[in-house]
């Protein structure tokens, strides 16, 4: 059965059976029946309850088998222990889609989990797709249909779809929407997600012509990679904005590297949302604030914002808020300035933010807004005003609405105040223009539009697959990892070599003699490093000596290192000392990767050295990386920005860093068995001279 | 005349003359007269207008001189050019307080500025205190009095005082307050602040018994140090929360140090607000959100928060939001857990956040809230709920209000939703319990209460005045600064010595010979550094050589350094080479100070080296520093946290760092002529061994 096709009855059922419909108005089974009957649903509605009787003018069938055609969706609200059996009956009756509202499953403990498993097995056998259990149901305001048992009134029809892993948030969301003046297209409470998950519903919900934006409340994602794949496709057509909570619940696991210590679940979610082109909301309020901007506004072509106001204070506040988000105040053309001068009194401020003065009339608002929108230097406009002393806020709103509708650039409005400006608010909402009471939230909405434009690029970017990669060799090497978890240095070097990552040529010496021999082969000066699979951070135990240029210092260095390491860790087994050709000076960065349980390979870049975890100058991307990811990681870290040259540091070989990151990402993507990879430092030589992995560590599972 | 006493007529006038009262209802002079008449003001109200006539049943006096007693406050709304003359007349009539609403002064350009100056001179001469010009006026809802010309209705009486440098924000604030359900005690529009400034009004407004919190909208502060002094006093009694905008307007100035480059106006404002104990709001919405929490709630004794909810999703969302603010989820006592188990069904979650399940009754809400408040591990509680399916949100509110009133711990409530929960909202507002539609804003309110408790400590802390400081010596040294702006190294060393800051013993050598001689005196090994007042960053030009242990390397080093520096900067004048005893290894930090134009000495601490500006691991405090400032600067930087020891770094001499900072701050406070001081690095030796300024720079004005 086509999995996607199988979800169709949820959104366009021919007939719905309410199993557990109740005559008792205090029961949820009554409220559900009532919501469904009142929703305007045009298909058949059937009630089922073992007790029989009549409800809302219709018979209640005692058996599901008695329900006449058409019926292809069941909404189940009976006690959990009876649900598995009813699944069986659904199958027999030819119903292959069910919404299980009942609680008492996995969320209620081990017994409930068993029951859920049983239900799922029967549903699978009967080829029934399930939403829930322990959910509030779903509704579609345009079809229309309402299978929830929420207290009325239901949401106003609109264009924001809301998918939620929390039922309680659904109830609040409907009311928030009413208060903030936007409508809901579809609302789906996902419950325990025994079968259908948030990911399964992205595409079917996005296909709905009435839905302009998808808002998600998430506590987790079941299958990370599949989510990324589905979401990447969906966002090409419709924006997705997600609130992911549960940030502080992730447990800590034992790690062997800086990358492992820093790459938490949240870094993975952030990297995954970015790759998928999904906007991550910081708060519930922001999610809905921005969802309506995304639903209603065209996208800006850039970050240059014009601000139009009738007072100084609001102008400064708006400019501050915009710049806080990294947006820029547009520098107007001469033409704009002279047009404004024609419209406004001499005492007005014509530069951005434009202060038209308190006397500004609705006509002046409209004319100036048109001028700002026509300026090629302006990508979007924010209009901000408290109720003007001589006109009503509503009159201003009415005057600017046609100008906003006539432009291809987004305009957001901050009408400052609350009760006095309700008329303006009503006009703007009816015209589907995003409006906010506070300037900072209007600025956040413009930021969301800019971010959406940028995220589209992230979603479109294709993962890089660097050439000349010898996967087979690594397969063999990994098949027989070295002693313990940490792969020995020689093997690690060969793994990197197979993936085209240049490492400092290093050989293991087991005696002074050998150390001298190797140093003659690799060339002087050399670096000596303690070789022990039990030592993670060599320099911490005095296990590194640099720049040894003659035989004498190599010999004494060999002894010094062994002695220091043994003093520091008397019980550690020492394999000897690595001899490495000294690499020329350059900038040093850390690159690494871990396997995230949800999203797989997660790559880190940043300021290396021993203080990585203190400085936290790092950025993450999902493996394999795209060019956009590489841009992001390098632009959002000091380590990355510094590569362009800094004070006496010459510009470093950025191309080589990008290449090393792409190759390391490919390695992490190709071998989920490699738990952690870290190069710290990767020494980045001046432009054109490459980058060399100086210290490397690979941990297999 | 006592300056403070002279402000009394603004807040308790015996009689008010409205100069510019108008019979024309479309004029502001009419609206002002109307607002004042309707405000319930019990003193005498007099109208003045050169045209005469009658207004609101009263005569309009043609001349101010004709106005009968009592009258001690003038509200002026006539065209700017006539204002200076009316000041004269006010003086003659014995009026010594005036609110100038008229615009057309400094804000309107050079001519207006001249007019303002003229007005101010006359006012000074006539001993008249002025609020404005270009302001909306002031109002007090308890006296009551309303001298604004804002469109009605005015604000509901309440306990939040609002002082604003923007008139437009005043109008919005009244309406925001109405919408968010709190009242205003006093509202003052400051206008151009020709005379009375935000600082002048802090104390008089805080003295008002009806005012429980002061909210400030600021675009700047005229006299920084005075503001800090006044605010520190006021916050001991009443909280102040400020929104300071105009962050991005500060121009850049030429600087000679990292400290100078990083110590922007915003760092100074942040340090000043912290020192004064003033809460800085991030957005306009946050200012008013938090103002009402501060006005209505007791302060928590600590950061441990209990969360009570009827659903899982809201619980996770609340926990996330709280932890995002650095607050902690309280770990309940056994007693609490068993009490909760008695009240709630088995399937509930008893650990924090407490999920009572959707079935929770108002009684259960109340009983559980009482349990949480009685837990000694809990400092505050957040109640969060969407409208419950089986009860009304209002019933829950009614049930919990007496519990909240009966506790000395703060409780904030997030009733999720908007229209459906209005009854609950009305109850909570009437009971003066801070409530929010969104959980994240409720969390922010708890955070504000915790921050207020902490800020009280900042305000109480007394500046440190380190002993054994030889101010006289520095006075002499500064009187004759070296060549140019940068003070020469020998003088700088003597300045530091006079303030008890240990520097690496350094002497200038003008020849190889001298370098060798000095090295023998200070002891081997030594460091050589280029000496030139034209070179700021010595290592950038190859001007530093470390660890030279014998005569030969000192001789060749001397030549190398001069050659390298000359190659890098052929036109720079070289004074020779500094010879310095090599300091033992230790952690390195940067400490520095600049003079901020508003707030004076501003001290910086953080990660030093050459990448200070890239890493931005820095914190600021106002000179002279308090112990609280030192705590803050060390706890909020990686450089500071690292001093406790990190991996193979032993614990460093934190006491010595604190002492060096305190002494450097004292130096900056004592000598405003010293524009920039920087020690980079200050090498911090292991515990008990002190800290040594290795590279120092002082720039005088």
Image (cartoon, coloured by chain):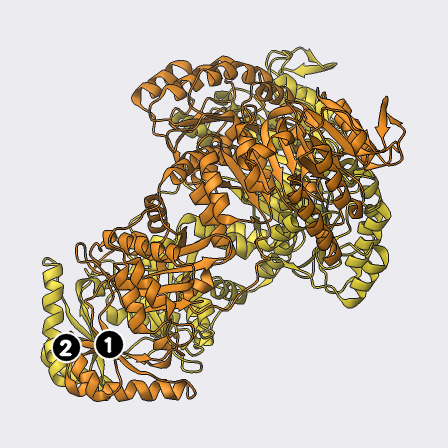
Chain colours: A yellow, B orange
Q: Which residue is mark 2?
A: B521
Tell me the quadrant of the picture where the C terminus of chain A can be found. Answer: bottom left
Mark identifier at residue B40:
none
The image shows residue B36 at horizontal and vertical percentages of 75, 27
Dot 2 crowding, Cα within 10 Å, few <14, some 14–19, many 20+: few
Mark identifier at residue B507:
1
Is residue B618 at least partly visible in the picture? no
Return the disc, 1 or 2, that comes first in the chain's sequence: 1
The image shows residue A360 at horizontal and vertical percentages of 81, 47
The image shows residue A434 at horizontal and vertical percentages of 71, 44
The vertical placement of B579 against A282, above or below, is: below
The answer to whether the residue labelled 1 contacts the one labelled 2, judged by CB atoms less than 8 Å apart, is yes
Q: Residue furthest front?
A: B92
The vertical placement of A453 against B344, above or below, is: below
* Mark-to-mark CA distance, 1 and 2: 10 Å
Q: Secondary structure at mark 2?
A: helix
Q: Are marks 1 and 2 on the same chain?
A: yes
* Residue plotted at (17% across, 54% down): B688
The vertical placement of B620 against B389, above or below, is: below
């Amino acid at each position: 059965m086509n999995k996607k096709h199988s979800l169709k009855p949820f959104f366009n059922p021919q007939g719905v059976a309410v199993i557990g419909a109740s005559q008792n108005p205090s029961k949820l089974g009554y409220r559900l029946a009532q919501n469904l009957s009142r929703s305007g649903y045009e298909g058949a509605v059937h009630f089922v309850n073992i007790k029989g009787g009549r409800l809302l003018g219709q018979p209640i069938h005692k058996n599901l088998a008695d329900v006449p055609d058409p019926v292809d969706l069941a909404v189940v609200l009976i006690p959990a222990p009876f649900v598995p059996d009813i699944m069986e009956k659904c199958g027999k009756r030819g119903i292959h889609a069910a919404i299980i509202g009942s609680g008492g499953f996995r969320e209620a403990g081990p017994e409930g989990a068993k029951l859920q498993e049983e239900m799922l097995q029967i549903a699978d056998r009967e080829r029934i797709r399930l939403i829930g259990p322990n959910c509030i149901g779903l509704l579609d305001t345009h079809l229309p249909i309402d299978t929830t048992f929420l207290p009325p009134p239901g949401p106003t029809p609109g264009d924001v779809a809301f998918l939620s892993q929390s039922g309680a948030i659904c109830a609040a969301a409907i009311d928030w929407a009413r208060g903030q003046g936007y409508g809901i297209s579809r609302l789906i409470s996902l419950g325990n997600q025994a079968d259908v998950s948030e990911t399964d519903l992205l595409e079917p919900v996005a296909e709905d012509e009435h839905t302009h934006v998808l808002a998600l409340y998430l506590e987790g994602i079941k299958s990370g990679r599949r989510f990324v794949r589905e979401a990447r496709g969906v966002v090409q057509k419709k924006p997705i904005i997600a609130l992911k909570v549960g940030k502080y619940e992730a447990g800590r696991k034992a790690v062997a590297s800086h990358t492992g210590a820093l790459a938490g679940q949240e870094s993975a979610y952030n990297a995954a949302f970015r790759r998928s082109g999904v906007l991550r909301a910081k708060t519930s309020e922001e999610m809905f604030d921005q969802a309506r901007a995304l639903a209603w506004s065209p996208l800006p072509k850039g970050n240059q914002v014009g601000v139009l106001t009738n007072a100084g204070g609001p102008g400064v506040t708006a400019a501050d808020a915009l710049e806080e988000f990294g947006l820029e105040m547009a520098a107007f053309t001469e033409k704009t300035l002279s047009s404004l001068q024609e419209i406004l009194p001499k005492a007005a401020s014509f530069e951005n933010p434009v202060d038209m003065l308190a006397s500004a009339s609705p006509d002046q608002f409209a004319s100036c807004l048109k001028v700002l929108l026509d300026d090629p230097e302006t990508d979007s406009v924010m209009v901000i005003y408290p109720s003007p002393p001589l006109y009503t806020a509503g009159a201003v709103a009415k005057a600017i609405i046609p100008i906003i509708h006539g432009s291809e650039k987004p305009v957001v409005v901050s009408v400052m105040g609350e009760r006095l400006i309700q008329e303006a608010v009503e006009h703007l909402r009816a015209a589907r223009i995003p409006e906010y009471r506070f300037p900072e939230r209007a600025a956040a909405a413009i930021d969301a539009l800019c971010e959406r434009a940028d995220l589209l690029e992230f979603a479109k970017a294709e993962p890089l697959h660097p050439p000349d990669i010898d996967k087979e060799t690594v397969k063999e090497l990994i098949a027989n990892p070295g002693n313990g978890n940490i792969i020995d240095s020689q093997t690690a070097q060969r793994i990197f070599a197979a993936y085209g990552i240049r490492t400092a040529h290093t050989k293991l010496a087991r005696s002074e003699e050998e150390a001298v021999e190797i140093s003659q082969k690799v060339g002087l000066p050399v670096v000596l490093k303690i070789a022990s699979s039990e030592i993670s951070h060599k320099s911490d135990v005095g296990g590194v000596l640099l720049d040894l240029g003659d035989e004498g210092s190599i010999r004494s260095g060999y002894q010094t290192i062994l002695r220091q390491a043994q003093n520091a860790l008397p019980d550690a087994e020492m394999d000897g000392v690595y001899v490495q050709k000294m690499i020329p000076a350059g900038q040093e960065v850390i690159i690494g990767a871990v396997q995230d349980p949800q999203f797989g390979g997660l790559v880190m870049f940043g300021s290396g050295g021993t203080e990585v975890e203190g400085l936290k100058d790092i950025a993450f991307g999902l493996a394999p990386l795209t060019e956009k990811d590489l841009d992001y990681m390098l632009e959002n870290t000091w380590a990355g920005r510094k590569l362009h040259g800094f004070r006496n540091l010459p510009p470093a070989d950025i191309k080589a860093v990008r290449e090393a990151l792409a190759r390391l990402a490919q390695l992490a993507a190709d071998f989920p068995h490699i738990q952690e990879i870290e190069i710290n430092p990767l020494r980045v030589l001046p432009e054109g001279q490459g980058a060399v992995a100086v210290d490397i560590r690979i941990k297999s599972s």
